[in-house]
Amino acid sequence: MTSGVLSKIVWISSLAALVAGVWQTVPSAYAQTADGPRFEVASVKLSKDTAPGRDVSITPGRFRGKDLALQWLILTAYRINSKFLSGNLPSWTIGERYDIDARTTGPANEEQVLTALRELLKERFQLQEHRATKDEPVYFLTVAEGGIKMPTGSCVPVKKDLPNECYSQTNEELITTVDWRGVRMSDPEGVAYRTLAGHFSGINNRVIIDKTGLTGTYDVHLQWEKDPPPTAPGEAAAQTTPAGPHAPSLFDAMEKQLGLRLESGRGPVEYLVVDRVEKPLQN
């Protein structure tokens, strides 16, 4: 996640310092935009870790990312799945990794921090992008015959400006159990992955489009069984049916446990297309 989740610089005077991996301070005059805060202080430097180990922390007024490739930074800033990122993405955008520590002038919520992160990517990496929509196979989330089986519910996170804390997931062999309090089916103005449709988008590489018409928040208890991993060529399957407890497929579980259906269809899928990007250091 973070979407999540997404500082103006005098480039000529800061290039040498950036090469040395020194912390960069953004002039306070550039700390505010028409859409929200920018980072007042921001460090962008190549990671020295020898092994990849992505880590993101978003707290009020601050973004910290460790060992992040630019593509991961874009996914976080724009809160999208990697499937929906395309365009001009040179190999270094996934091969080189960066450590980032950036702060706004004052307290800022997660959405404002990610807005500042998007501006930072445009300033430091010269990121230029646009949105494009394609008609593709999707799943439509609908109410099953007999109606919903989810109780209404709510969740008030303890930390107001941080992600919803009312979600938990456990995995036991092939069985996954999700408990989620106060979740919406979808929220066009919110964070997609914090809704049921957004969270499960990506199944069979398809987006889920909410057609339930449900606008409230619900408590979800969902348990399903994933397909076993494919057998490698030349290897015999150790067991056709794994031993232990069993659960329905995700599609059946949604209908039986939640009163929801996933129906195949075609619909609009939005992509983030990168038009231009450059390394933060230019020699």
Image (cartoon, grey):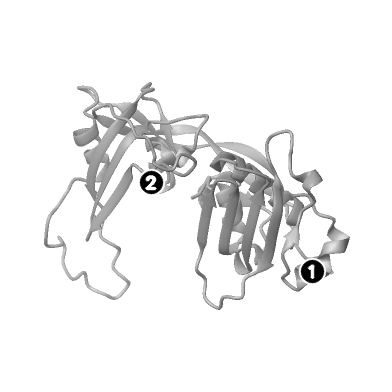
Q: In the image as oriented, which residue stretches furthest toward the right?
A: 12
The image position of residue 43, as x and y in percent, is: 69, 61
Which residue appears at 15% of the width and 62% of the height?
A: 242
| Mark 2 crowdedness (10 Å alpha carbons): few <14, some 14-19, many ≥20 | few
Relative side of 47 to 263, left or right? right
What number is the disc on residue 126? none
What kind of residue is marked 1?
Answer: Ala
Q: Judging from the image, what secondary structure is the residue with disc 1 in?
A: helix
Q: In the figure, 14 relative to 48: above or below?
A: above
Q: Is residue 120 left or right of residue 17?
A: left
**In this view, the mark in front (2 or 1):** 1
Q: Residue furthest bottom?
A: 50
Q: Nearer the viewer, residue 203 or 129?
A: 129
- 36 displayed left or right of 255: right
User: Which residue is depicted at the point 60% across and 57% down?
Assistant: 71
* Whole-number angstrom distance, CA of label 2 to CA of label 1: 44 Å
**Residue at numbered disc 1:** 17
The residue at the point 26 percent across, 75 percent down is: 235
Q: Picture coordinates of residue 75 (x, y %)?
A: 56, 51
Q: In which quadrant is the C terminus drawn?
A: bottom right
Q: Is disc 2 placed on a helix, strand or loop?
A: helix
Q: Nearer the viewer, residue 232 or 259?
A: 259
Vertical placement of residue 64 versus 221, above or below:
below
Residue at x-position 22% and y-position 40%? 253
- Per the image, the residue denoted by label 2 is 203
Q: Earlier in the sequence, mark 2 or mark 1?
A: 1
